[in-house]
Image: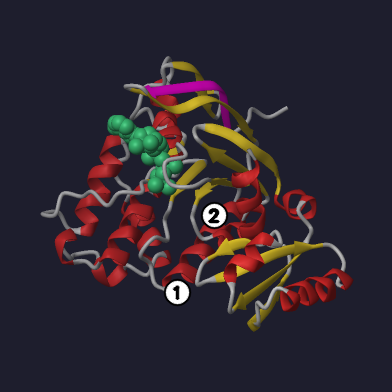
Amino acid sequence: MAVPAIRISSVTKQYGRLQALGGVSLEIAQGEFFGLLGPNGAGKTTLISALAGLVRADGGTLEVMGHDVVSDYRNARRSLGVVPQELVFDPFFTVRELLRIQSGYFGMRHNDDWIDEILASLDLTTKASSNMRSLSGGMKRRVLVAQALVHRPPVIVLDEPTAGVDVELRQGLWQFVRKLNTDGHTIVLTTHYLEEAETLCGRIAMLKGGKVVALDTTQNLLNRFATHSLRVRVTNRAVALELGGRAVEGNWVEFAFEAFADVEQLLARLREGHADVTEMALGEPDLERVFIEVMHRD
Ligand SMILES: Nc1ncnc2c1ncn2[C@@H]1O[C@H](COP(=O)(O)OP(=O)(O)OP(=O)(O)O)[C@@H](O)[C@H]1O
Ligand SMILES: [Mg+2]
């Protein structure tokens, strides 16, 4: 059996009195496209930082390609490329300089061929000589991706790589990441765009309050919550909520149902309660619904 790309066992991390990670265990096989999802503050970045050796876990162990991130730090770090959530750069370097310096950290001196290839894949070739401070936010994010790949790591972790990235670029980035995955790289992705996670990730872990609250293939997660939904906008929201609806954004109320016959009944009861339906939409199960269900379960 090949070693797992990532093995996380009972990892805990405390910030003062706040428990950021409360015993996280995960194993990600080589070649997987894995999604790490969770609301703000769930502990995703903390877990990724612990993997990268930027944060020391209080308890438990983390391994990358079989290398312990503490006792075998160099090899673990060498096996891992992290695209960080925060945009932090030295503004005075050009894109190419930055990538050369990063190569140097990993002892790769003549890396320009590979750097050129990455720049081309990320549509950054024309920006190679630009200073970091002159780049737009989306371009900086692409440079972060390039920086993570410079040492050709087998495992790549992307912490919200598409935040603030325009649609076209996002598509381009996904195409590129998909290709890396097809070429054999293990990909771990954190994103708040659940639609993207749904199409890209084969398996997903959901974190909440520093704990794994769901872990399964994307398909199984979708099947497990395979209810339809009906969203309505009504003149009297209180009535809709009393009937078991859930308040969702934009003043809509959402109902889950199994059979379409239930819809008729529901509409009848809304009418009886003098809540007139002004707008209505049907929804199929998607990852966003699964996510909300999981997060509200406990
Ligand atoms: N350096 C730190 N000092 C104190 N608390 C921290 C520190 N870093 C993170 N935390 C806290 O740990 C918890 C987990 O934060 P983390 O950044 O891992 O969440 P996240 O899942 O990445 O959230 P987001 O989706 O917003 O990026 C949060 O409550 C956060 O406030
Ligand atoms: Mg984060």
Q: Position of residue 63 (x, y in %)?
A: 52, 25
Q: Position of residue 243 (x, y in %)?
A: 71, 62
Q: Which sits in the foreground, 148 or 214?
A: 214
Q: Is residue 7 covered in magenta?
A: yes
Quarter where residue 135 is shown: bottom left
Q: Name the quarter where the C terminus is drawn.
A: top right
Check disc 2 and give the amino acid type: Leu
Q: Answer with mark 2 or mark 1, whichever residue precedes in sequence.
A: 1
Q: Position of residue 151 (x, y in %)?
A: 39, 42
Quarter where residue 280 is shown: bottom right
- Residue at the image point whose x is 47% and y is 44% from the top: 157
- Residue at the image point whose x is 49% and y is 54% from the top: 191
Check disc 1 and give the amino acid type: Val
> In the rendered image, which residue does mark 2 sit on?
180
Q: Could you tell me what secondary structure mostly forms the magenta stretch?
A: strand
Quarter where residue 288 is shown: bottom right
- Residue at the image point whose x is 73% and y is 79% from the top: 271
Q: Position of residue 163 (x, y in %)?
A: 39, 60
In the structure shown, which secondary structural element does the residue marked by tag 2 occupy?
helix
Residue 167 tag number: 1
Highlighted magenta segment, given as a residue range: 6-14
Which of the two marks, 2 or 1, is nearer to us in this view?
1
Compute the Cα span from label 2 to label 1: 20 Å
How busy is the neighbourhood of tag 2: few (under 14 within 10 Å), some, or many (20 plus)? some
